[in-house]
Image (cartoon, helix red, strand yellow):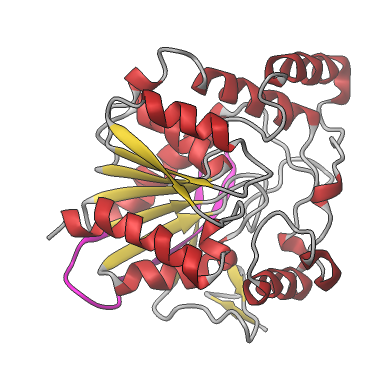
Amino acid sequence: MTAKVDPTGPKLVIVPSNPVPAGVRLGYVTTPDRVKLRYAIWPKSAGPHRGTVCLVQGRTEYIEKYFETIADFRARGFAVATFDWRGQGGSDRLIGNRTVGYVDRFDDYWTDLRTFHANILLPDCPPPYYLVGHSMGGLASLHAATRDRMMFERVFLSAPMVSLAGMEESIARWAVIAETLSFLGLGRVPFKRRGDRRPTEEGFADNPLTSDVLRYMRMVETVRADDGLYLGSPSFRWLASALRAMLEAGRADFPGRLQIPLLVLAAARDTIVSTPAIEQLGLRLRNGRHMGIAGAKHEMFMENDTVRGQVFAAFDAFVTNQTR
């Protein structure tokens, strides 16, 4: 079952376990380099007016995955604006194999965010604006915060991809390998990993994303309803670009370039991104802080109620309660 704005416009995939929050407005916005991004915006649903949360996703994710979280922000008095990054979700896929993650440069995500901010967020959503980023979206958010401190009032990050778990000491070496393979014409070839399989019921037991079976199954059912949302392995070109962005975030001068107040959350049981690297960044922040979330796997917004309670308590202390 799908909901459409018009016969030729964007759609949202709806399954019984994942209803779309009421009041959505869907559309496409086109970047200066002619990539079409699917976006959605919602008004607040309760409480006093607090501004707009701009929610940016991790790699492989899509708008539908955040319906519950969007409802949580709206109930706090925030409008919510979100979009699918280029190459995933309902936005333009960039290469012939739709299931392979690809981007020419990590800076292209800055183009996506800047386009969305200028053309959708500013004209259509109430200020002030708060950036909430997860994983890859968290790394893109960090880089954005070094470039324009006026775009957002505050930045709230969930498990930002500042390094990969178990690869902390080999990021630079892998960046060179991926760049070399890309130079040799293999940039669109997938970097295959076991964890990039389609989500299935059987995969819950050892999944690295969440300990909550119902929220995990929601992901399974959504992708099963529309396989077009699925994104598998990253390409070597994506890997090279992302690793270089991680190395930049690890530079000694990087925290000093972050001029927007930040709160960075690290998941204690994360096996996808490096929790120690997040903690090291947090300790070096001049205009922010970090905190660990006990018991959490990588996708804290998709975790059990106890973990999500900690995440939203942190958000309320850092953002919601500052708007009164």
Name, please, the residue furthest toward the front: 294
Residue 299: within the magenta? no
Q: Quadrant of residue 38?
A: bottom right
- Residue 159 vs residue 257: left or right? right
Query: Observer-nearest residue: 291 or 101?
Result: 291
Is residue 138 placed above or below 47 in the rendered structure?
above
Residue 41: within the magenta? yes
- Residue 290 horizontal/vertical position (percent): 39, 39
- Residue 272 horizontal/vertical position (percent): 68, 43
Write the residue at 72% across / 32% down.
166
Name, please, the residue furthest toward the left: 324
Viewport quadrant of the C terminus: bottom left
- Residue 127 horizontal/vertical position (percent): 21, 54
- Residue 105 horizontal/vertical position (percent): 62, 26
Is residue 161 placed above or below 4 in the rendered structure?
above
Name, please, the residue furthest toward the bottom: 16
Query: Observer-nearest residue: 9 or 121?
Result: 121
Viewport quadrant of the N terminus: bottom right
Q: Which residues are magenta?
A: 29-51
Write the residue at 61% across / 30% down.
163
- Residue 186 vs residue 315: left or right? right
Disc count in the image? Answer: 0
